[in-house]
Amino acid sequence: MNSHGSFLRQIQLKRQSVSSYNYYPFSLGVIKSLEKLDFHPKVTYIVGENGMGKSTLMESIAVAWGFNPEGGTINFSFSTRSTHSNLYEYIQLIKGPHRPKDGFFFRAESYYNLATNIDHLDSQFSFGRPIKESYGGKSLHEQSHGESFFSTFVHRFGGKGLYILDEPEAALSPLRQMAMLARIHELVQQNSQFIISTHSPILMAYPDSIIYNLKPDGIEIRSLEETDHYVIMRQFLNNKDNMLKQLFENQAKDE
């Protein structure tokens, strides 16, 4: 791994500070076994089945860095619910020598709240430009879900940034996911670093990257072709009729 971007090199779990692994989030297998996690200077993927702790881990990294738990830039401090875990208090960040000029924590699940907060801030008197101008010029609520996601990636992300994205594919068509890959490449060439949690084999395909697969008993490194997401998608597309037949037969047996 070269020194490109590398604003965040590694996280370490302050294990000596954890009093018990019997309660959430420390009871998650991934956290129980976590010593340290190295980040690729360009793109790091965090993948795995739901319930493994992807969002919890992503949130703790983002909040430890200084982002709002519900997303946005470092400057956002709104909160519609404080359900984030305290894992961030036990995360030690190992930073690179350079500071990013930009940054964003993108959370698909709380993106609506971010859009509402931007509208609220823009409705108040200010001498500055409306915030929405950094997001394509119109309210994110006036765009479709996919459009507003994509206009954030295109207009708000400015390069030389640390971008932490939690399931950004949630409202993106496969075509838009490929466009997103091109945008990631553009920003990487502008010395940006990405940490991305995703279920999308398309988004996982960035070549200069590392993929961490979260399992019940810990974390392993996998290639794209070794991920369940890729294997299952390929099997389905290559053998659709047999897989559907099998799925429906299994369902009939269960009933």
Image (cartoon, rainbow, N blue to C red):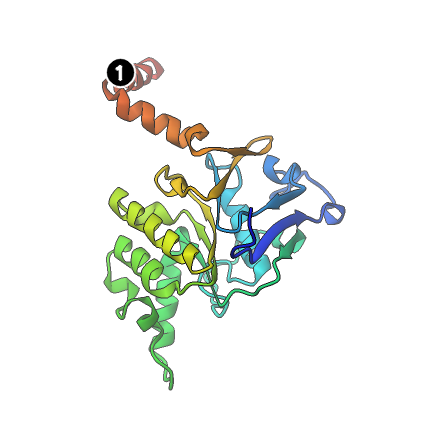
For the residue pair 106 and 191, the one nearer the viewer reads as: 191
Which residue occupies 32% across, 60% down? Answer: 154
Q: Residue at x 40, y 51 (%)?
A: 109
Residue 63 x/y as whole percent: 56, 58
For the residue carrying disc 1, how many other residues have a C-alpha within 10 Å: few (<14), some (14-19), or many (20+)?
few
Q: Quadrant of the C terminus?
A: top left
Residue 205 in percent (x, y) is at: 39, 40
How far across and down, in percent of the image, does residue 219 sit? Answer: 58, 35
> Eyeballing the image, is 51 above or below 181?
above
Q: With 217 as the anchor, is 137 left or right in this view?
A: left
Between 204 and 115, the one lying in front of the other is 204
Query: In the rendered image, which quarter is residue 240 located in?
Result: top left
135 left or right, relative to 32: left
Looking at the image, which residue sits at the far bottom?
A: 127
Q: Is residue 237 left or right of residue 37?
A: left
Q: In the rendered view, tell whether residue 201 sits above or below residue 76.
A: above
Residue type at mark 1 is: Asn
Q: Is 194 located above or below residue 78 in the figure?
A: above
The residue that label 1 is drawn on is 242
Looking at the image, which residue is at 27% across and 22% down?
238
Q: Name the foreground residue: 171 vs 36.
A: 36
The residue at the point 62 percent across, 58 percent down is 95
Residue 53 rendering spot, x and y as whole percentages = 53, 41
Residue at the outermost front position: 2
